[in-house]
């Protein structure tokens, strides 16, 4: 359902949207619950929160602000070699972490896990650096196309098998800034 109170704040964007799946309030509530849980679990461990640019920064900023223990933050960035390579989870590290993770308690933060291929590749890479622990926190989880079992310690929401935008998720780099999750009208995919 479209909630005018929410979409009216985005007059230049709301015309592209067909349905709001997760409201700003639902996101706020779930993210702060995750933050509270992580604060408890990692108390005294000075965890290192690792994100992959750039979809995750929206979720990660909210999540980390709801955590009340000392922590550190780092980012990596990846690029696909080609669509075929991406299908096998092969990605090129275009920006590595700045901090060493050896002996650290690492929490890998992700926006959405779909096939799990990219994440699996990155986790294997990080494991070779021998962190004290390595867990995953994903804002959104899609299971329909999962090819590799990813142990998800923290999960925000399960998503249906649909392409969604908002809260960091993009379609051709747009819509990341929406503070809710929505479906696009079919004509948006057809135009250009
Ligand atoms: P995978 O888990 O290796 O298949 O990669 C998941 C990636 O696909 C995410 O990081 C997103 O960039 C992208 N993705 C998957 N589902 C969606 C969606 O519904 N909207 C936008 N991007 C998506
Ligand atoms: Mg991503």
Image (tube, rainbow, N blue to C red):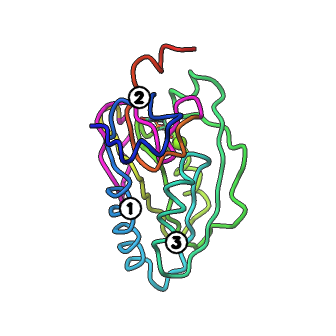
Mark 1 and mark 3 lie on one chain; the one further toward the N terminus is 1
Mark 1 and mark 2 lie on one chain; the one further toward the N terminus is 1
Q: Quadrant of residue 99?
A: bottom right
Residue located at (43% from left, 42% from top): 8
| Residue at image mark 1 | 28
Image side of residue 69 versus residue 155, left or right: right
Residue located at (56% from left, 76% from top): 71
Mark 3 closeness class: few <14, some 14–19, many ≥20 residues within 10 Å: some
Against 5, residue 45 (above or below) is below
Horizontal and vertical percent position of residue 122: 56, 48
Q: Quadrant of residue 24?
A: bottom left
Residue located at (36% from left, 47% from top): 5
Q: Is mark 2 on a helix, strand or loop?
A: strand
Against 115, residue 192 (above or below) is above
Q: Magenta stretch containing residue 45, yes or no?
A: no
Q: In which quarter of the image is the N terminus?
A: top left
Q: Is mark 1 on a helix, strand or loop?
A: helix
Horizontal and vertical percent position of residue 178: 49, 45
Q: Magenta stretch containing residue 152, yes or no?
A: yes
Q: Does the residue labelled 3 lie within 8 Å of ligand 2?
A: no
| Residue at image mark 3 | 105
State which mark lies toward you, 3 or 2: 2
Mark 3–mark 2 CB contact (< 8 Å): no
| Residue at image mark 2 | 184
**What span is colored magenta in the figure?**
146-173
Mark 2 closeness class: few <14, some 14–19, many ≥20 residues within 10 Å: many
Q: Is the magenta stretch mostly helix, strand or loop?
A: loop
Mark 1–mark 3 CB contact (< 8 Å): no
Residue located at (55% from left, 57% from top): 127
């Amino acid at each position: 359902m479209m909630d005018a109170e929410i979409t009216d704040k985005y007059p230049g964007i709301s015309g592209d949207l067909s349905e709001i799946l997760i409201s700003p309030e639902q996101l706020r509530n779930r993210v702060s619950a995750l933050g509270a849980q992580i604060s408890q679990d990692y108390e005294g461990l000075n965890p290192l929160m690792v994100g992959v640019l750039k979809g995750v920064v929206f979720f990660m900023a909210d999540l980390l602000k709801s955590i009340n223990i000392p922590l550190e933050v780092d980012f990596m960035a990846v690029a696909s070699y080609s669509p075929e390579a991406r299908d096998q989870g092969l990605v090129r590290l275009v920006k590595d972490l700045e901090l060493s993770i050896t002996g650290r308690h690492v929490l890998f933060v992700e926006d959405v896990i779909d096939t799990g291929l990219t994440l699996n590749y990155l986790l294997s890479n990080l494991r070779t650096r021998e962190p004290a622990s390595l867990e995953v926190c994903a804002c959104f989880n899609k299971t329909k196309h999962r090819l590799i079992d990813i142990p998800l310690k923290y999960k925000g929401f399960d998503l249906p098998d649909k392409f969604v935008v908002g809260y960091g998720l993009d379609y051709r780099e747009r819509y990341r800034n929406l503070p809710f999750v929505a479906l696009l009208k079919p004509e948006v995919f057809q135009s250009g």
